[in-house]
Amino acid sequence: MRYRVTLLKGDGIGPEVTGATVKILAAAGAPIDWEEAPAGLEAVEKYGVPMPEVTMESIRKTRLGLKGPLMTPKGRGFRSANVSLRKELDLYVGLRPVKSIPGIVTPYKDVDLVVLRENTEGLYSGIEHEVTPGTVLTLKVSTRRAGERIAKWAFEYARNAGRRLIHCCHKVPVMPLADGAFLDAFRSIGDQYPFIEKADMPMDSLAFSMAQDPDPFDVLLLQNLYGDILSDQAAGLVGGLGVVPGANIGDGIAVFEAVHGTAPDIAGKGIANPLAVLNSALLMLQYVGEHKLADRIERAVFDVLESGKVRTGDLGGTSNTAEFTEAIIDKL
Ligand code: NAI
């Protein structure tokens, strides 16, 4: 069995980290045929938009994508490429597993939690306009349907992954309608899963509690903006943005990508950590059922990190992207 996967190399450090990932997967013998598709700045130059139809079409066909981070050009009226992708392919689940990594020392031990973000609405509705000069209106959209389907996905995920507890996070006291609908959907779907523990928590309390001690948390279910922010905070618990993977998942279609952005401050220097995109590719291998292969690559990564000799600057090392990539390939 071979897999056809649409590859969006991304902007900034994107080509560096997706390139490293493709190299490592090839060295591991991953049965993947890549179908490269334009996105971001490259696509703006060629098609006039950051997420052209030709790329959407490729993902609709392959049902699998691996994506580097994308930059949406500012002030040119473009809709965010990431928002377009998630909305148009209806990738309504943002899955971000956050786990301590052997060899990476942080103030927290044995972190193991999953951030689930509703990807299609909330404050990222893309509906924004200037009502009168100086007054801008941005709409936060919260539908019962979106709340229920992500809640259903969350409970099914927890059941299959052996997760015991889901926290639904919100700001119901200040947004009783929008966030109240999300919480209601969580509770009503949750009634069908009496064997999974449920809790809810205001977003600010959650951020505070997680910084103090992430241990009590298992699965976190959040609306779009809260999920975006909390994913980065959660990444900080286990070594930073350079290591945490992600996936955008719809019904029978998924695009895998790191939590981090294009990192303009280090782009082109060859020093980015490719681990977040590599780990996203491992999530993709698990998604298609290639668990043994994913485990073998993960073991090689852990061996390199545990040896402590080769690691990128964000993890306190002095190695560059190519040296880290080669070290993983050597272990494989
Ligand atoms: P960022 O995640 O690009 O960078 C934040 C900090 O983390 C920087 O200091 C950067 O050097 C570091 N960093 C990120 N990834 C790293 C890696 N793999 N290895 C080592 N260090 C790493 O966030 P920022 O600066 O807020 O956003 C930059 C651009 O990326 C913006 O245009 C933003 O819109 C875009 N972006 C795209 C995303 C996507 O395509 N999914 C997600 C987040 C941001």
Image: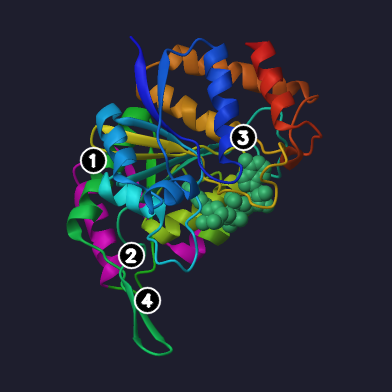
- For the rendered model, the colour scheme is rainbow
Label 3, residues with CA under 10 Å away: few <14, some 14-19, many ≥20: many
Q: Which residue is mark 2?
A: 126
Dot 1 or dot 4, earlier in sequence: 4
The magenta segment is: 177-206
- As shown in the figure, which amino acid type bears the numbered disc 1? Tyr
Kind of element beneath mark 3: helix
The mark lying in front, picked from 4 and 2, is 2
Dot 3 or dot 4, earlier in sequence: 3
Q: Which residue is mark 1?
A: 193
Label 4, residues with CA under 10 Å away: few <14, some 14-19, many ≥20: few
Label 2, residues with CA under 10 Å away: few <14, some 14-19, many ≥20: some
Q: Residue at x 53, y 15 (%)?
A: 26
The mark lying in front, picked from 3 and 1, is 3
| Percent x, y of residue 286 | 41, 23
Q: Residue at x 24, y 55 (%)?
A: 147
- How far apart are the alpha carbons under marks 3 and 1? 43 Å
- How far apart are the alpha carbons under marks 1 and 4? 28 Å
Q: Which residue is mark 4?
A: 174
Kind of element beneath mark 4: loop
Q: Is mark 1 within 8 Å of ligand 1?
A: no
Image quadrant assignment for residue 248: top left
Query: 292 above or below 16?
Result: above
Q: Residue at x 29, y 44 (%)?
A: 53
Count the numbered circles shown: 4
| Percent x, y of residue 65 | 38, 32
